[in-house]
Image (cartoon, helix red, strand yellow):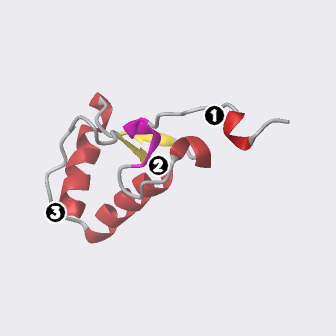
Amino acid sequence: MKRINDTPVKRFAHRPNDFCRVCRENIKISGRSQVNIFADKNQEFINHFQTVNASIVEDVKGLSQVLCQKCYRIVVKYHNSKKF
């Protein structure tokens, strides 16, 4: 008879880019689309994000570089509605 402690356990290490930088939703599990905010084409978005967030957004090792599509859209809508 096997005991519970004898059952092998699969360990999975989460990486920072598995999570949205804003809402911390696990993108891999939720299946949401993601946007890498530090890609060259998203420089304008980073400026909008910094304005909305009222702080500097930097690419720091250990922090996620992605936003889920939902948070990305919310930032864009908020920036467009406020006409900064």
Mark 2–mark 1 CB contact (< 8 Å): no
Disc 1 target residue: 9
Q: Is residue 83 above or below residue 36?
A: below
Q: Position of residue 71 (x, y in %)?
A: 43, 56
**Between marks 1 and 3, how big is the CA–CA gap?**
43 Å
Tell me which residue sits at (14%, 51%) in the image.
56
Q: Secondary structure at mark 2?
A: strand
With 46 as the anchor, is 17 left or right in this view? right
Amino acid, disc 1: Val
Mark 3–mark 2 CB contact (< 8 Å): no
Q: Position of residue 12 (x, y in %)?
A: 53, 34
Q: Is residue 17 magenta?
A: yes
Q: Residues within 10 Å of mark 1 (few under 14, many from 20)?
A: few
Q: Secondary structure at mark 1?
A: loop
Disc 2 target residue: 68
Amino acid, disc 2: Cys
Q: Position of residue 73 (x, y in %)?
A: 44, 56
Disc 3 target residue: 54
Give the residues in magenta: 15-20
| Mark carried by residue 57 | none
Q: Residue 31: in sight, yes or no?
A: no
Depth check, front residue: 68 or 73 = 68
User: Which residue extends farthest right?
Assistant: 1
Q: Secondary structure at mark 3?
A: loop
